[in-house]
Amino acid sequence: MPITRGHRQLVDEAIAQITTYSVQQVVPRLGDATLQLVDIRDARELEREGTVPGAIHAPRGMLEFWVDPDSPYFKPVFGDEGKEYVLFCAGGLRSALAAKTLKDMGMTNVAHVHGGFTEWTKQGAPVETLAERKAAKAAAGVAPAKGDA
């Protein structure tokens, strides 16, 4: 069966319908209680490359289930309507599609980072390894949650 709408067309359509931020727009908001960065990359990518300080990990394959309060997999971190959930992946393609999907589900407080984690690191924005994250949590006396990254 031939593909009639390729990934590039789907991404372009998504970008036309969602909010996109540059790294320069997001960095000053780090630590802002109204911002929740969401790393949707595969766990192996996080392990290999690190992540953004304060970002939560929500694997792309589980995202729709984790944000839906009616799902048995719902994560309460996604239930705060006072936060803006800004997604990122490696290059901005998966996060654009994911943000569009969440918007289609009814979320109005969702956006994504143009260029993803690749652009984030290229711009010299803050990064932490998973080992650094775990050490900081241990020093603060915070027990790691299951699947925490």
Image (tube, rainbow, N blue to C red):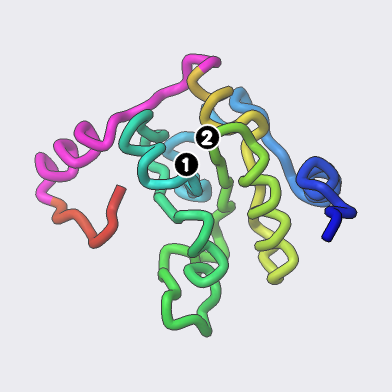
Q: Is residue 20 magenta?
A: no
Residue matched to label 2 = 29
Q: Position of residue 30 (x, y in %)?
A: 46, 34
Q: Nearer the viewer, residue 127 or 140?
A: 127
Seen as rendered, the residue at the extreme front is 1
Q: Residue at x 58, y 46 (%)?
A: 86
Q: Residue at x 81, y 47 (%)?
A: 6
Q: Residue at x 23, y 59 (%)?
A: 145
Left or right, 84 with reference to 2: left
Q: Residue at x 64, y 29 (%)?
A: 115
Pointers 2 and 1 in contact (C-beta within 8 Å): yes
Q: Amino acid at mark 1?
A: Asp
* Dot label at residue 32: 1
From which residue to which does the magenta span run?
A: 122-141
Vertical relation: 126 (above or below) 99: above
Left or right, 16 with reference to 101: right
Q: Is residue 134 magenta?
A: yes
Q: Give the secondary structure at mark 1.
A: loop
Q: Nearer the viewer, residue 57 or 107?
A: 57
Q: Give the secondary structure at mark 2.
A: helix
Left or right, 106 with reference to 5: left
Within 10 Å of disc 1 (Cα), the crowding (few <14, some 14-19, many 20+) is: few
Q: Amino acid at mark 2?
A: Arg
Q: Position of residue 68 (x, y in %)?
A: 55, 75
Q: Position of residue 134 (x, y in %)?
A: 19, 41
Vertical relation: 17 (above or below) 20: below
